[in-house]
Image (spheres, coloured by chain):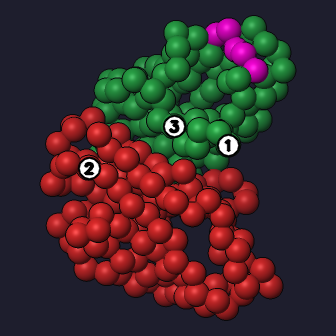
Amino acid sequence: AQKVTQAQTEISVVEKEDVTLDCVYETRDTTYYLFWYKQPPSGELVFLIRRNSFDEQNEISGRYSWNFQKSTSSFNFTITASQVVDSAVYFCALTTRSSNTGKLIFGQGTTLQVKP
Amino acid sequence: DAGVIQSPRHEVTEMGQEVTLRCKPISGHNSLFWYRQTMMRGLELLIYFNNNVPIDDSGMPEDRFSAKMPNASFSTLKIQPSEPRDSAVYFCASSLYQGEEKLFFGSGTQLSVL
């Protein structure tokens, strides 16, 4: 069975602080895909990143970076020098190839509040 | 492309009424998903279609819920009869290929059943 756990329900930081959002996943499949989505207060869900299970390279995009570690089944997301506009709910998600159903399972989400 | 289009944005109805939510996916996308978001249960996958065919509807809560995709550019999610516990935000999303590719979400329909 697939499962995504985001243990941090809410995080509050002050602007310019760095913050890491944790994501731990469970799957027995060897081929899978991990995602992060952002849901700002306006409500829409916005894609941030997609990684496949064969690519463990960390990725950086501006102030955002992602650390994928298969050894610990984690796909953590770091925001450097946070800004108020980063305030949102962030979701980690997982789908696997072998299940052949294409289900994308989301974690419960982490609410990030960045205070000025 | 205009993105995934959902209608209505807001729906307020009384218990027992039929509710129909609509979705137009991005042109060329083969997969369409319906999710429901609540505070208690988070984002739940209700059903998804691949090439207009329902692949997995195990998330549909009960027989009161039904979904159709008559063609590649339109899908509906129907609740009949509606109940207060159906109150949630319903999202439609589409992707090029199942859940392996990134999902593009619509703006959602905020449903309130009184």
Indicate the secondary structure of the residue bearing disc 2.
loop
Is residue B102 at least partly visible in the picture? Answer: no
Q: Position of residue A95 (x, y in %)?
A: 31, 48
- Please name the color used to draw chain A: red
Q: CA distance from mark 1 to mark 2?
A: 25 Å
Q: What x and y, as percent, mark residue B109?
A: 68, 37
Residue type at mark 2? Thr
Task: From the image, tell me which residue sits under label 2.
Answer: A27
* Residue B39 marker: 1
Q: Secondary structure at mark 3?
A: strand
- In the image, taking residue B113 as reference, residue B4 lies left or right, namely left
Q: Which mark is residue B44?
A: 3
The magenta-colored residue range is B80-84
Residue type highlighted by circle 3: Glu
Q: Secondary structure at mark 1?
A: loop
| Magenta: main secondary structure | loop
Residue A42's place in the image compared with B108, above or below, is: below
What residue lies at 70% left-to-right and 23% top-to-bottom? B85
